[in-house]
């Protein structure tokens, strides 16, 4: 017991587990005041999903011989195989926005 300097003799498993819990896990602190609702400005534009032309444009701007990112995919592969890759990337990006799940690696 925090602040209790007397020595207690405990015998049952239930008493031992209660003493262990109070010694090592004294309690959950009460939460402070909750955050008030913030006033956000109105959006500047309406969100629209990325399209294949935008993906093409982004890949074409990549430096082909730059060091690959952590995913290990070289830029030259993306630039040379753009026509094969882009039709698969579009649905992946659409699903990411629709589901609101963003892989950590991205």
Image (cartoon, rainbow, N blue to C red):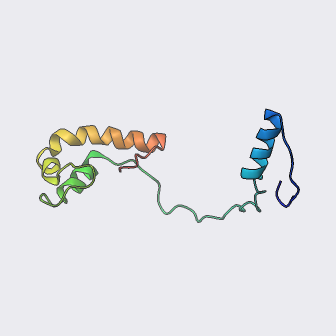
Locate residue 82: give its quadrant.
top left
Residue sitting at the far top = 13
* In the image, residue 11 above or below residue 5: above
- Residue 47, given in percent of the width and then of the height, sits at 45, 52
Which residue is depicted at the point 40% across and 49% down?
104
Relative to 100, 103 lies left or right? left
Relative to 105, 56 lies left or right? left
Camera sees residue 31: yes
Which residue is depicted at the point 31% across and 42% down?
90
Which residue is depicted at the point 79% across and 40% down?
16
- Residue 31, given in percent of the width and then of the height, sits at 76, 58
Relative to 106, 75 lies left or right? left
83 and 6: which one is in front? 6
- Residue 20, given in percent of the width and then of the height, sits at 75, 45
Camera sees residue 25: no
- Residue 79, given in percent of the width and then of the height, sits at 14, 51
* In the image, residue 35 above or below residue 20: below
Count of marks, rendered view:
0
21 and 80: which one is in front? 21
82 and 53: which one is in front? 82
77 and 71: which one is in front? 71
Relative to 89, 26 lies left or right? right
């Amino acid at each position: 017991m925090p602040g209790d300097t007397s020595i207690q003799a405990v015998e049952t498993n239930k008493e031992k587990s209660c003493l262990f819990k109070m010694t090592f896990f004294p309690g959950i602190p009460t939460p402070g005041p909750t955050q008030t609702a913030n006033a956000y400005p109105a959006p500047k534009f309406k969100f629209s999903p990325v399209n294949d032309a935008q993906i093409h444009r982004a890949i074409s701007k990549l430096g082909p011989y730059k060091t690959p990112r952590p995913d290990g995919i070289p830029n030259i592969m993306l630039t040379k195989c753009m026509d094969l890759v882009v039709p698969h990337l579009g649905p992946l990006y659409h699903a990411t926005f629709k589901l609101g799940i963003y892989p950590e690696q991205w």
